[in-house]
Every structure is written in C-alpha cells, then in structure tokens.
Image: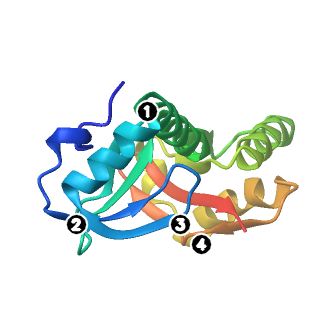
Amino acid sequence: MAIPHTRINHQITAPQLRVIGAEGENVGVISLQEALQKAHNAGLDLIEISPKATPPVAKIMDYGKFQYDENKKQKSSKARVLITEVKTLQVKIGTGEHDLALKAKKAAEWLKEGHKIKIDLFLPGRAKYLDQNFLKERLERILKLIPTEIKSDEPKKSPKGMTVVIENA
C-alpha cells in the first residue's frame, strides 16, 4: 500500500532539495538533477520526505523499504488507539443487594478495561415522582458496592428515570 502524497525520483518538482544520504548523513542542499544522479549511482530512489519544508527534504533510500516502514508506523499507531465504550447497567428501586453486587462486579471489570459506565435507575410509572434524595440514595447503593476508585457525574433525570455516568478515577 503506497503512501499517496509521496513523490519519488522524477515526480519531484522542486529545483533545490535538502538531501539525506543512504546512511542517514546530511548531503546538504543540492539541485534536483544532482540528487537524482546520486540516488541513481547508489542504485536507490530519491524520496521526498518533507515537501512543505524550505527547501523540501528528500532521502536517498529504497522505495520498497520506505513503504514498509510507513505501513509499519501506521499499523503501530492504530494498535495504540484505545476505544472506550459507554456500557450501560440498569437497576430498579427494588433490586436486591445480591443482584446489585453482581452488577457492581461487572461494572468493575468494565472499568478495568477502560470503559465508561452509564447506570440507569429505571423508574416505572409513578416512581418517577418519588423524592429526588431517595432516588439518589438508591443510585449511591450500587456506587458504594463497586470495589475500584471511581469518578462520577451528578445524577441526572432521564426519560427512564435517573442516570449517572462513572469512570475510573
């Protein structure tokens, strides 16, 4: 897979180039023709590394090796990206202690993986109109059972009832 913007050999248009040799040494600022000649003599390609620099920077090296190195860099940068998901736990007012403990254990596993967790306190029917402090206390019950350090937002009203988002501290 070639890097789309990379110009090599006769595709380079700049009249003067700062050239880096095959061994990594600085050749200096030379004309395009002279740089192409040096690359040809070495049996390698002239690859434009930094086209926006003044003068542009080019390197004498094998184009296949350059492509391999660039692909390797891209793959390693993709591997380092950590995808965080927002996982959801749903509890009700009457959820028992044992069930809350199981949900808290699952939440701790997700937190170790680096995910955020949205805990929904589901309130059916008239339960939505119960005292806010009572509902917050119900949410706090499960938060206390989570064995790891957490950072949580303030509980908010949601269409289902109340919601709090937590993450690792």
Identify the mark nearer the N-term, 3 or 4: 4
From this view, report whether residue 64 is shown above or below residue 51.
above
How far apart marks 4 and 1 lie (CA) works out to 78 Å
- Name the residue type under label 3: Pro
Q: Nearer the viewer, residue 2 or 138?
A: 2
How far apart marks 4 and 2 lie (CA) works out to 60 Å
Circle 3 or circle 4, nearest the eye: 3
Residue at coordinates 17% horizontally, 48% vertically from top-left?
12
How far apart marks 3 and 1 lie (CA) works out to 67 Å
The N terminus: image quadrant: top left
Circle 4 or circle 2, nearest the eye: 2
Q: Position of residue 60 (x, y in %)?
A: 42, 47
Residue at coordinates 22% horizontally, 44% vertically from top-left?
5
Identify the mark nearer the N-term, 1 or 2: 1
Q: Where is mark 1, residue-wise?
A: 43
Q: Which mark is residue 155?
A: 3
- Name the residue type under label 4: Asn
* Local SS, label 4: helix
Pointers 4 and 1 in contact (C-beta within 8 Å): no
Q: Where is mark 4, residue-wise?
A: 133
Q: Nearer the viewer, residue 2 or 157?
A: 2
Q: Which mark is residue 52?
A: 2
